[in-house]
Image (cartoon, grey):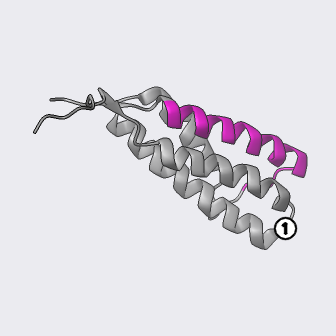
Amino acid sequence: MSNRYATPAFTRPALAPGILGAIALLAFIAVVGDDGWFTIARFVVAILAAIMVVFAVQAKQWWWVPPLAAIVVLWNPVLPFDLPVFAWQIAHILGAAVFVASGLFIKVHRVD
């Protein structure tokens, strides 16, 4: 049986966590001042960024590791940074942009 559809030359394994991370960052802008919800936001964002670091390393696209690692460190819930609310809000927007961009551009080429 023949395949009517062409097999794509690459996959984007980091697309789903990138979109989820961007949605989480934009949604959690509203709870930046709250200790309880912001701790949950830190866990979600740090875990998704760590997952994307693994995908970037597997795809051998090392240039995405420093910005994603910075997100992991900045949103680390174990040793939290204490930034002003406005700085966190700006960081959430910049972090969402990094999540979307890295999700789109981290590609794994197929070897057939």
Residue at the disc numbered 1: 34
Magenta stretch, main secondary structure class = helix
In the image, which residues are magenta?
A: 81-104
Q: Is residue 3 above or below residue 34?
A: above
Say which quarter of the image contains residue 70: top right
Q: Position of residue 14 (x, y in %)?
A: 45, 42
Q: Residue extending furthest left?
A: 1
Say which quarter of the image contains residue 38: bottom right
Q: What residue is drawn where x is 47% and y is 45%?
A: 52
Q: Is residue 101 above or below residue 38?
A: above
Q: What residue is drawn where x is 75% and y is 45%?
A: 92
Q: Quadrant of the C terminus?
A: top left
Foreground residue among 94 and 27: 27
Query: What kind of residue is marked 1?
Result: Asp
Q: Considering the numbered disc 1 on the image, is that residue within a helix, a strand or a loop?
A: loop
Q: Is residue 94 visible?
A: yes
In magenta segment, residue 112: no
In magenta segment, residue 88: yes
